[in-house]
Amino acid sequence: MSAWVRDAKKRKYAVPMVNVSDIEFLRAVLDIAFEEKSPVIVGIASPYFEACDQNLLECYIYYSMKRARTPYAIHLDHGRTVQQIVRAIKLGFTSVMIDASYLPFEKNVEMTRKIVQLAHPFNVSVEGELGRIRGEEFGLSTQSSDYEELTDPEKAREFVQATEIDILSVSVGTVHGMEYRHKVRVEVPLVKRIAEKTSIPLALHGSFKAPDEAIKQAVEAGICKVNLALHFWEPFTNGVKEALQTKEEIVPLERILESGWKNVREEIRYRMRLLGSSGKA
Ligand SMILES: [Zn+2]
């Protein structure tokens, strides 16, 4: 994957990573990627990875292989343990994130480096994280969810050099999860400074509720991968509500879901165009 994400860096667009949690969701992602001629990263978030049936995970991988007609990767989002990452690699994931950003710098380097040594022989890309993004952290951090530590450009340079990761997730003002009571911002000059110090693609997490213009500028400044998850909840909910506005007492399941997925598909398309990945595959 790192080769075509590097292309994003060169041509100044970002590849969307969509966290899926349903096979219909996966189908929507791959279909729209084809229609938009966009590369795409299919994400499986760590809590879902843990809860998901093993056969279903295999299904996601098999289905992507059969269905994808543009460059794609299957990515473990926010991997937490060596065991989890080994399991993902064995299953056929082509990209993993190790999030050890809650650990002190040296420990983060150590853990991330270990994953790189484990993954690279299998041609699996590794994303690391440096800094503390506000919001939900799956309960691993001892800090409050209000705590924020912006990524230090010089430390980022050191981190990338020491770990040899392929992608770096940065803390530049965005917020993880639903805790967007804080104003979600993107510190574009900081993205630029980090990009200058590191030569690898940068990832933006927590961009839900970030203004479109800020996202565009961040991509221009060096963001090459944008994580998308919550962005699809509202369109889906609205679609379902629409299907339920009927006098019928029982509504066919397909009609309810289809109405939700239709909106999700349009949102994926919108995001691809915003990130500039449309037409790049
Ligand atoms: Zn994240």
Image: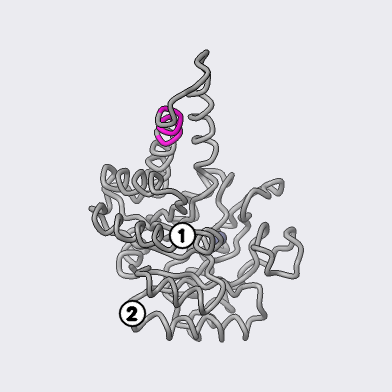
The x and y percentages for residue 153 are 57, 73
Which residue corresponds to mark 1? 53
User: In the shown orientation, is residue 150 left or right of residue 11?
Assistant: right
Q: Nearer the viewer, mark 1 or mark 2?
A: 1
> Can you see residue 266?
yes
Tell me which amino acid carries mark 2: Phe
CA neighbours of label 2 inside 10 A, class few (<14), some (14 to 19), many (20+): some
Query: In the rendered image, which quarter contains the N terminus?
Result: bottom left
User: In the shown orientation, is residue 241 left or right of residue 222?
Assistant: right
Which residue corresponds to mark 2? 122
CA neighbours of label 1 inside 10 A, class few (<14), some (14 to 19), many (20+): few
Q: Residue at point 54% right, 83% down? A: 158
Magenta: main secondary structure: helix
Label located before the other in sequence (1 or 2): 1
**Of the numbered discs in the image, which one, if any, rests on residue 182?**
none
The x and y percentages for residue 120 are 37, 81
Marker count (numbered) = 2
Q: Residue at point 54% right, 66% down? A: 78
The x and y percentages for residue 44 are 46, 59
Instruction: Read off the magenta span.
Output: 255-261
Q: Residue at point 51% right, 78% down? A: 83
User: In the shown orientation, is residue 109 left or right of residue 104?
Assistant: left
**Farthest residue in the top direction?**
247
Tell me which amino acid carries mark 1: Asp
Q: Residue at point 37% right, 49% down? A: 26
Q: Nearer the viewer, residue 241 or 53?
A: 53
Ligand 1 lies in quarter: bottom right
